[in-house]
Amino acid sequence: MSDELRHLWRTQPSEARPPAPEELRARAGAFERTIRRRNVREYAAGAIVVAFFGARAMFTDRELERVGSILVAGGAAFVVTFLARRGSAGPRPDALALDGVSYLRAELSRQRDLLRAVWFWYLGPLAPGLALVAADSIIKAARSGHGLAIAIGAAGVIVAAFTGIGALNMAGARSLSREIEALDELTGGRGGSSSS
């Protein structure tokens, strides 16, 4: 056999093997830590939003700002509750051998679906209150004759932030879909059946 053929033989791709149980444990553990860290950040942010807008609702004398602030605080409470119920990492099976692939795939699918629905459970509950608070600021600035450009600019920043958050979550969902597809390829589709 020539050296070139020997080199081609050695460098040809080997058949994909299902991940070992140790690798599955490591991947599942890393994914769970990522989800836990994300959730802790969201819980902290939610507490800050509830406290800030709750105080704003109590101390304002403008009705539109009060209603908007109450809606934002309520929306943040909904977001945190929804995330705690639907976005926490599921319980890990004790033995991550054969069903480890199914577990990891199910967790990836669940988190992907959560990201895809970000407009429903995350951005949607905050939008009405923030719209009212922004409208109140614009009305106040228009009546006073100054700061109108700043108020309109702040409303634009909110819209841009919502659009960016939505886009980042969709990109995250696509990334998780690719991980699911790669896991399916490795296991020959043994990872369970959840829509990608």
Image: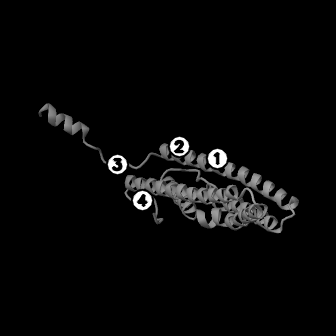
The total number of labels drawn is 4
Q: Secondary structure at mark 3?
A: loop
Location of the C terminus (image quadrant): bottom left
Q: Which mark is residue 190?
A: 4
Q: Is residue 156 visible?
A: yes
Crowding at mark 4 (Cα within 10 Å: few <14, some 14-19, many 20+): some
Q: Is residue 103 visible?
A: no
Q: Based on the displayed image, in which of its 4 quarters is residue 188 positioned?
A: bottom left
| Kind of residue indicated by mark 4 | Arg
Crowding at mark 2 (Cα within 10 Å: few <14, some 14-19, many 20+): few
Q: Residue 44 in the image: x percent, y percent? A: 73, 50
The residue tagged 3 is 16
Residue located at (72% from left, 60% from top):
76
Q: Outermost residue toward the left?
A: 2
Say which label, 2 or 4, has the lower sequence index: 2
Is residue 10 shown left or right of residue 53?
A: left
| Kind of residue indicated by mark 2 | Ala
Crowding at mark 3 (Cα within 10 Å: few <14, some 14-19, many 20+): few
Gap in angstroms between the C-alphas marked 3 and 2: 19 Å
